[in-house]
Image (cartoon, coloured by chain):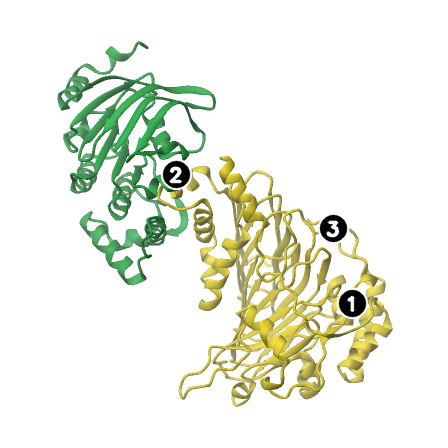
Chain colours: A yellow, B green
């Protein structure tokens, strides 16, 4: 590589996480530290029913006796849970009743992020393509197109609102997929969760637009602990998208979310994530710790849950979106692209638990490592004795860029049902000098060449994303790998 | 168009080219022949600017510009095209997407607007059709699962789409049966024009029955040992490279 290239690469490495700005918004923040008082404070802020406060407190007491998991292939200094804030919300004099009352600075922030919070006028016969719930630090600040959705009986609102307005649904399903005692981070979330989205699609309804939540961390020293609950009743369909960004900071910030999905008979949930939390700088300073528990329950017969994720951000990703396939003939899918560049560490994969008869699952994981990053696929396919005729196909591909990164594959397969069929394929490849030179000889810069080659590697996953998201994700891949050439 | 003076080049510290003088003018086709290991492929990589192929002495200029300070993609944008002996596979990237990215990168470097999707599709279809390449080949991943003939035909397609001013064909005949060879040669011949030059690198005379050179050079031990007309190729076919076995 020539000196010219090296300089260029250095410049690209130093650039550019374009969502790294901070908004000047006055916030209402809980004092640092975690104790029962903190939890009572959060619960009171949200005006929660007593059962929910009790739920939080019992989770907290359980958490005190738990130990942070150490089995993931990631390394970080010990996290001081007392050194973080657990609640931060933009100050608002009155709760905005419509979008016109939302703080203009907040609207500007989302504008800058490219997230439209203004509802477009709904023309006759043309329905909008996407409705958004915007979560800023610990609270949901706006949800668009609520009225249009309500007309179909669809509930799309912040979790806090759901706890007030739809207590029966919340009580019935909340914590039913990820119990409060599930794991260290999920239990912490169960104690201190703040806001997230709630979706309910009534029987037989096909949600006419993409539902989306955009998570933004703004405040300093604040963790984000969102909670999302999506229920697709019998024969319902919904496609849900999640996006996230955070300012550039030198400290690490903790994001420990819990997402629960429930699909009843013949229902389908498609859940897509483009995760772009601040990854830290090229030397590994700062960045978000993304320790997330996501799980879907295919409770009904012939139900289907698909997870599609493009993970490009975060200093550390620890995340295993899973499916519990208890309904007969239910289907679980997991499509993942995980990129780790510079000093990023990703330990991600899925669990497919086959319980019902003739359940099927598909796993396609594409891991890309560059710089000094470590990327691990960790997956479990478990077939219980009851899952007669279950089938799984797993494909894990790793792509290495440069010689200082690592890719690891840790697949667990447990089958107690002799009629089950489980297939696992894995490949590891390197972006070759030959490929780069070939593209350059055809006029492409090394960066364009890398984006093209990586795009090809990820194609199977990218085509699972909704159109608008796929274009965004493709660009994001290019940006996250900038500077990794040579 | 292309001027090499006393060109020396090495790979990993080992001298491979040891003083090459070559002048190629617009409209000409030059054949460079030679035994295995004579430095033929090295010459093509040095011209294209591949990393690891170091020029240690001498000069090389293309259209009056010094190639030494130019990156491979800048050389491509300036109109230098190398048809690979072993075209590279890129899984998951459709041929169509590859050609589109490539053509638009070169147009951009030349200060032209990128072609929109409709114009691009039209151009690619026309060019592919002229070479007898079907739509399905445009939709397949670049060179993945292509037969030897398909790969070389695909190189010819890229060349026809990018319209370079200097085409370097590196052992284009290797791995081709006679029908595939004819088809590729036809594609190459269709591109010959007064303002375009060709360098055909080959071990065998066979290819030169289909792509007729104006000048033939014999490269051995890193130097051009003889230069002549098309009759030189015939002579080599009859006598082999035995005359050039000794370094000198």
Residue at label 3?
Answer: A76
Quarter holding residue A330: bottom right
- Return the x and y of residue B15 as percentages of the image width and height: 41, 19
Are labels 2 and 3 on one chain? no
Return the residue nearer the eye: A316 or A260: A316
Residues at marks 1 and 2 touching, judged by CB atoms closer than 8 Å: no
* Mark toward the viewer: 2 or 3: 2
Residue at label 2?
Answer: B72
* Mark toward the viewer: 1 or 2: 2
Q: Residue at x 15, y 31 (%)?
A: B212
User: B36 above or below B247?
Assistant: below
Is A409 on the left-hand or right-hand side of B51? right
Question: Which chain does the numbered disc 3 sit on?
Answer: A
Under circle 1, the secondary element is loop
- Return the x and y of residue B100 as percentages of the image width and height: 33, 53
The quadrant of the image that shows the C terminus of chain B is top left
Residue A380 seen in the current view:
no
Residue at label 1?
Answer: A85
Under circle 2, the secondary element is helix
Return the residue nearer the eye: A439 or A331: A439
Residues at marks 2 and 3 touching, judged by CB atoms closer than 8 Å: no
Disc 2 to disc 3, C-alpha distance = 41 Å
- Return the x and y of residue B74 as percentages of the image width and height: 37, 41
Return the residue nearer the eye: B135 or A355: B135
- Return the x and y of residue A409 as percentages of the image width and height: 60, 48
Disc 1 to disc 2, C-alpha distance = 52 Å
Is A198 on the left-hand or right-hand side of B151? right
Mark 1 or 3 closer to N-term?
3
């Amino acid at each position: 590589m020539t000196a010219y290239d090296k300089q260029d690469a250095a410049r690209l490495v130093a650039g550019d996480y374009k969502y790294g700005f901070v908004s000047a918004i006055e916030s209402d923040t809980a004092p640092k530290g975690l104790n029962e008082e903190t939890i009572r404070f959060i619960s009171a802020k949200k005006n929660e029913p007593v059962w929910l406060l009790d739920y939080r407190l019992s989770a907290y007491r359980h958490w005190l006796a738990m130990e942070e998991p150490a089995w993931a292939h990631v390394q970080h200094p010990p996290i001081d849970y007392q050194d973080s804030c657990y609640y931060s919300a933009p100050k608002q004099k009155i709760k905005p009743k419509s979008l016109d009352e939302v703080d203009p600075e907040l609207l500007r922030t989302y504008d800058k992020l490219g997230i439209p919070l203004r509802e477009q006028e709904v023309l006759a016969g043309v329905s909008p393509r996407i409705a958004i719930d915007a979560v800023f630090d610990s609270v949901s600040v706006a949800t668009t197109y609520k009225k249009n959705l309500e007309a179909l009986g669809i509930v799309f609102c912040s979790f806090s609102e759901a706890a007030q307005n739809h207590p029966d649904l919340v009580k019935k399903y909340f914590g039913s997929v990820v119990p409060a005692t599930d794991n260290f981070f999920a239990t912490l979330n169960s104690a201190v969760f703040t806001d997230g989205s709630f979706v309910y699609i009534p029987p037989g309804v096909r949600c006419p637009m993409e539902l989306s939540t955009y998570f933004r961390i703004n405040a300093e020293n604040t963790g984000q602990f969102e909670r999302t609950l999506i229920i697709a009743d019998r024969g319902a369909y919904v496609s849900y998208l999640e996006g996230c960004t955070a300012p550039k900071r030198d400290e690490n910030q903790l994001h420990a979310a819990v997402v629960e999905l429930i699909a009843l008979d013949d229902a389908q949930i498609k859940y897509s994530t483009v995760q772009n939390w601040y990854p830290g700088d090229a030397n590994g300073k700062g960045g978000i710790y993304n320790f997330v528990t996501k799980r879907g329950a295919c409770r009904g017969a012939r139900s289907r849950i698909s997870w599609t994720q493009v993970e490009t951000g975060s200093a550390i990703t620890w995340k295993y979106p899973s499916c519990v396939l208890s309904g007969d003939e239910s289907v679980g899918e997991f499509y993942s692209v995980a990129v780790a560049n510079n000093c990023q560490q990703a330990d991600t994969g899925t669990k497919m638990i086959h319980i019902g008869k003739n359940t099927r699952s598909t796993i396609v994981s594409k891991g890309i490592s560059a710089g000094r990053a470590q990327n691990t696929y960790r997956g479990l396919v478990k077939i219980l004795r009851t899952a007669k005729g279950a089938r799984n196909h797993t494909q894990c591909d790793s792509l290495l860029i440069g010689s200082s990164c690592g890719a690891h594959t840790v697949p667990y397969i447990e089958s107690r049902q002799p009629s089950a069929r489980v297939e696992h394929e894995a490949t590891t490849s390197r972006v070759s000098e030959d490929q780069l030179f070939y593209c350059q000889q055809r006029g492409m810069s090394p960066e364009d060449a890398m984006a093209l080659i990586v795009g090809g590697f990820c194609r199977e996953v990218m085509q699972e994303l909704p159109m608008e998201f796929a274009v965004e994700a493709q660009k994001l891949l290019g940006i996250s790998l900038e500077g990794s050439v040579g | 168009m292309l001027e090499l003076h006393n060109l020396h080049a090495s790979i990993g510290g080992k001298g491979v080219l040891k003083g090459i003088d070559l002048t190629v003018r617009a409209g000409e086709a030059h054949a460079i022949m030679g035994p295995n290991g004579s430095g033929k492929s090295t010459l093509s990589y040095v011209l294209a600017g591949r990393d690891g192929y170091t020029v240690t002495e001498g000069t090389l200029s293309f259209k009056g510009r010094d190639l030494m300070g130019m990156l491979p993609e800048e050389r491509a944008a300036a109109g230098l095209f190398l048809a690979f002996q072993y075209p590279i596979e890129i899984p998951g990237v459709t041929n169509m997407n590859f050609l589109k990215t490539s053509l638009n990168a070169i147009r951009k470097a030349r200060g032209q607007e990128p072609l929109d999707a409709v114009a691009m599709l039209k151009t690619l279809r026309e060019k592919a059709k002229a070479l007898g390449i079907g739509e399905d080949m445009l939709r397949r991943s670049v060179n993945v699962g292509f037969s030897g003939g398909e790969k070389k035909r695909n190189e010819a397609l890229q060349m026809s789409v990018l319209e370079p001013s200097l085409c370097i064909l590196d052992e284009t005949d290797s791995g081709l049966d006679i029908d595939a060879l004819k088809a590729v040669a036809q594609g190459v011949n269709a591109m010959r024009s007064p303002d375009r030059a060709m360098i055909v690198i080959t071990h065998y005379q066979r290819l030169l029955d289909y792509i007729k050179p104006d000048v033939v050079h014999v490269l051995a031990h890193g130097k051009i040992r003889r230069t002549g007309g098309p009759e030189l190729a015939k002579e080599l076919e009859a006598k082999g490279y035995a005359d050039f076995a000794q370094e000198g």
